[in-house]
Image (spheres, grey):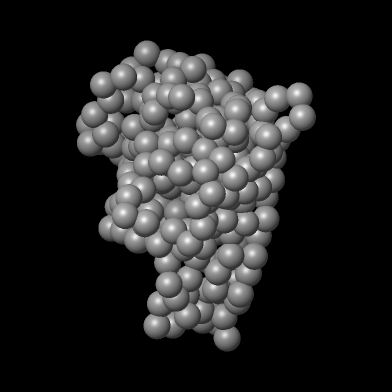
Amino acid sequence: MGHEFEVSLDADVDATVDEVWQAIATGPGIDSWYMGHNEVAGGEVRTVFGQYTPVAPIFAEEPGKRFAYGAPPEPDGRFLAYDFLVEARAGGGASIRVVTSGFLPGDDWADEFEAMTKGGAMVFRTLVEYVNHFANRTATPVLAFGPPITDWDRAWAALGAAFGLDRPVREGDRVRLSPDGAQAVEGVAYFVNDHVACVRTNDAMYRMVRGFQGPMLAMHQLFAPGVDAAEAGRTWQAWLARVFG
């Protein structure tokens, strides 16, 4: 069986076309809102995200207008491609449209598609937050895995408590978080669904993500200078273990 899909998301942003282009078509720009570490070179986009290391050839590149890339289909037909379209808005700012297309093989594609779609909405919203609030700044991406979770209602309630709330976090909430006993920082929940909860502060975007295979993941972008990604990953792994262990 399997499922062929195409999902389109769009937004108007305050950033210029050049700022959006830097965000979507350069390695440091992609690092600042997507996931993992990314390089754009030799006609390819290379991503390192844990053990996942896809290499996606660029199939369209019109500076300031269009940037598209995707890996060739795997033997089982699986593939994933991204097509970014950018244009200037009258009066300033830019419009961004992202079309994600691909094929998921197997009879169990529906659960993967749900997770991918909700995660994709988070990634797109993070791109919008990045160009609106952090344009021309570069983030250090941080990844950490928490313990396996079987009761997600309880997990989201625990996350809300860790954010200083008496309920699960909702979009628009003002929250406080304190990783590993460090000084608490305040932020706003900029995107929430039943798979993710994302918070923006002055120097970071913190994203808590329901992993497809069970754990809670921390997938953050940290904009403060001098961040050690490995050390920050260990800090957040300890935080996840404390909150969800």
Image check: 55 left or right of 159? left
Count the marks: 0
Quarter of the figure with residue 124: top right
Instruction: Name the outermost residue toward the top.
Output: 183
- 136 up-or-down from 6: above or below: above
- 76 up-or-down from 66: above or below: below
On the image, the x and y values in percent for residue 89 come to 73, 33
Q: What residue is shown at x 48% (from left), y 71% (from top)?
A: 79
On the image, the x and y values in percent for residue 81 come to 51, 62
Q: Nearer the viewer, residue 37 or 23?
A: 23
Q: Nearer the viewer, residue 40 or 184?
A: 40
On the image, the x and y values in percent for residue 167 come to 62, 32
Q: What residue is shown at x 31% (from left), y 54% (from top)?
A: 42
Q: What residue is shown at x 39% (from left), y 28% (from top)?
A: 138
Q: Quadrant of the C terminus?
A: top left
Q: What residue is shown at x 63% (from left), y 43% (from top)?
A: 86
Please say whether residue 160 is visible from this viewpoint: no
Q: Quadrant of the N terminus?
A: bottom right
Please say whether residue 232 is visible from this viewpoint: yes
Image check: 69 left or right of 99? left
Instruction: Name the outermost residue toward the front.
Output: 62
On the image, the x and y values in percent for residue 126 come to 55, 37
